[in-house]
Image (cartoon, rainbow, N blue to C red):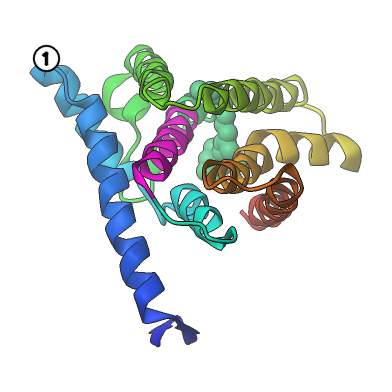
C-alpha cells in the first residue's frame, strides 16, 4: 500500500497509473510538436497550465474499473485528447475572464495578447480532434464533439448572464453542468467504453463524473 494524502492506495495501481500518465503526456507533447519553432514554444507554455491531470486520470481509472479492464494505448490517446480539449477551454476561458495568472504562471493572453490566445485555443482543439481521429473507434470523436458543443453552450449561457445579479439556481446549475461537469463525466464514460463497458456501467460512471464535476466547480 502507498499513502497519498493520508489515504492508503494499492501500490501496483499507483505505479500503473503513473506509467500511463507519462504515456499520456508524451502523446500530448508529440501531437503538438510541429515544424515551426515559435509555435512549438507557444505550445510548450501549456505545460504550465497542467494541474492534477484529473480528467486523464479518470479516463484511465474508468478503463481499469470495468470488469476485465486493461489499459491500452487507446486509453492513453483518449486521455490525451480529453486533456487537450480541457487545455483549449482554459486558454479561451482566460481570454473571456481577462485573467492574468493561471497556476504557476502568466496566462497566454497576458503574455501574448488575446489574438494569439484565441488562435492557440483553436490550434489545441483542432489537434485534439486530429489526434482523436487516429483512434480506431470513431464514436469517441462523435461523443467528444457533442461534449465540446456542450462546453461552448455552458460558456455562452454564462456570458449571457454576465451582468445578471439575480442569477437563479437552475441557470447556475445549467452553466456548471455544461461548462465543467460534462467533460469530467465524459472522461469517466469514455475510459470505460474503451474497455468494452456496457452502456449501463458507462452511464453510472458518467453520472459519478458529472456529480464530482458539479461539486468541484461549486467549490472552485
Ligand atoms: C473555467 O471556468 C472554464 C471552463 C470550465 C470551461 C471554459 C469553456 C470555454 C471557454 C468554451 C471553449 C470551448 C472549447 C471547445 C475550446 P472558471 O473561469 O470558472 O474557472 P477558472 O478559475 O479555472 O478560470
Ligand atoms: Mg476563468
Q: Is residue 117 magenta?
A: no
Q: Residue at x 71, y 56 (%)?
A: 208
Name above or below for residue 148 compared with residue 72.
Answer: above
**204 w.r.t. 112: above or below:** below
Q: Which residue is mark 1?
A: 36
- The front one of 74 and 116 is 74
Q: Nearer the viewer, residue 9 or 218?
A: 9
Image quarter for residue 2? bottom left
Q: Which portion, as a residue range, is magenta?
A: 72-91
Q: Residue at x 27, y 21 (%)?
A: 112
On the image, which quarter does residue 17 sit in?
Answer: bottom left
Quarter placement of the N terminus: bottom left
Secondary structure of the residue carrying tag 1 is loop
Q: Position of residue 194 (x, y in %)?
A: 52, 42
Instruction: Classify 67 as above or below 50.
Output: below
> Residue 74 lies in magenta, yes or no?
yes
Position of residue 112 in the picture relative to residue 41 (left or right): right
Q: Quadrant of ligand 1?
A: top right
- The image shows a total of numbered marks equal to 1
Amino acid at each position: 500500500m502507498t499513502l497519498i494524502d493520508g489515504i492508503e492506495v494499492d501500490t501496483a495501481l499507483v505505479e500503473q497509473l503513473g506509467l500511463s500518465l507519462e504515456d499520456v503526456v508524451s502523446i500530448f507533447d508529440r501531437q503538438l510538436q510541429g515544424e515551426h519553432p515559435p509555435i512549438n514554444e507557444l505550445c510548450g507554455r501549456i505545460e504550465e497550465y497542467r494541474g492534477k491531470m484529473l480528467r486523464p486520470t479518470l479516463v484511465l481509472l474508468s478503463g481499469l474499473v470495468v470488469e476485465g479492464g486493461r489499459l491500452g494505448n487507446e486509453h492513453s490517446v483518449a486521455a490525451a485528447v480529453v486533456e487537450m480539449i480541457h487545455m483549449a477551454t482554459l486558454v479561451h476561458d482566460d481570454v473571456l475572464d481577462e485573467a492574468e495568472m493561471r497556476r504557476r504562471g502568466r496566462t497566454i493572453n497576458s503574455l501574448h495578447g488575446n489574438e494569439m490566445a484565441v488562435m492557440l485555443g483553436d490550434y489545441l482543439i483542432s489537434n485534439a480532434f486530429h489526434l482523436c481521429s487516429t483512434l480506431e473507434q470513431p464514436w469517441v470523436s462523435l461523443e467528444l464533439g457533442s461534449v465540446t458543443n456542450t462546453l461552448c453552450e455552458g460558456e455562452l449561457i454564462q456570458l449571457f448572464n454576465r451582468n445578471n445579479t439575480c442569477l437563479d439556481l437552475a441557470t447556475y446549475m445549467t452553466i456548471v453542468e455544461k461548462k465543467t461537469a460534462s467533460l469530467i463525466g465524459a472522461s469517466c464514460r469514455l475510459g470505460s467504453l474503451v474497455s468494452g463497458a456496457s452502456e449501463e456501467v458507462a452511464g453510472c460512471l458518467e453520472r459519478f463524473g458529472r456529480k464530482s464535476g458539479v461539486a468541484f466547480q461549486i467549490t472552485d
